[in-house]
Image (cartoon, rainbow, N blue to C red):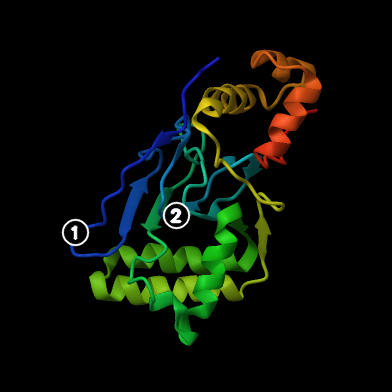
Amino acid sequence: MKNLAPSYEVITPSFGSSFTYTRYIEKANNKSDVWHYHPEIELVYVNGGSGKRQIGSHISYYTDGDLILIGGNLPHCGFTNEQTGNKNETVIQMLPDFLGTTFFDTIEMRNIQNLFNQSRVGIAFKGKTKEKIGAKIELMDTQNSFEKLLTLLSVLNELDESKDYTLLNANGFSLQTQVHDNDKINVIFNFVKDHFQELITLEEVSSLVSMTEPSFCSFLKRLQIKHLPLL
């Protein structure tokens, strides 16, 4: 079993831009085994292929590509690897206030602010939204910095207006804990990540952190972790 703590990823905006835009060919962005987080909101478009989502305490599979919006400081793994079979992957990362502390408080930007608030639990878009927005995201690769920004704002506005989505941690997710809880959380999440296709019992996981089953349930409740996929 891997016992790696969720790592903090330092992100630097692209040159001449207030956000990052990175295009990867096929499996070049191989972070599928890296459990990490960062304060930036992340928009990921995977063109084609099938793979696994692990965002917060949510684990599922995607097929025929994916379009995901991940809120700041929401732990996640990468989405592509040598088995995914995708054509390419585009990742956009931006701080919630990347255009200024009050920009998204304006009337015109309220839709995007609403989207940012929803992204705290992770959002997967599908259907026509995934196809249409995915094409716009890839088009940004040929645009200059100003055009990229305008396209990004348009993309974010359209995502908020879309009804074609799923909230991945529907009842919320929190990793705001005291320092002495971190080791237990790391053991739990990494065990579930490595064994999620197996039958995982409450007794088995609670014993990993030397707790009784009632104490373990109270521990999860206190941390507001409501979607640990135990069977």
Q: Amino acid at mark 2?
A: Glu
Q: Nearer the viewer, residue 185 or 129?
A: 185
Give the quarter of the figure containing the C terminus: top right
Q: Is residue 143 visible in this depiction of the protein?
A: yes
Mark 1–mark 2 distance (CA, rounded to whole Å): 18 Å
Residue at numbered disc 2: 42
Horizontal side, residue 54 vs residue 16: left or right: right
Q: Which mark is residue 15?
A: 1
Mark 1 vs mark 2: which is more N-terminal? 1
Local secondary structure at mark 1: loop
Give the quarter of the figure containing the N terminus: top right
Horizontal side, residue 78 vs residue 166: left or right: left
Q: Nearer the viewer, residue 98 or 54?
A: 98
Q: Is residue 201 visible in this depiction of the protein?
A: no
Residue 71 rendering spot, x and y as whole percentages: 51, 54
In the image, is residue 123 above or below residue 116? above
Q: Residue at x 70, y 53 (%)?
A: 170
Q: Residue at x 75, y 24 (%)?
A: 215
Q: Residues within 10 Å of mark 2 (few under 14, many from 20)?
A: many
Residue 74 rendering spot, x and y as whole percentages: 52, 46
Q: Nearer the viewer, residue 113 or 141?
A: 113
Q: Residue at x 67, y 42 (%)?
A: 224
Q: Amino acid at mark 1?
A: Phe
Residue 186 rendering spot, x and y as whole percentages: 54, 26
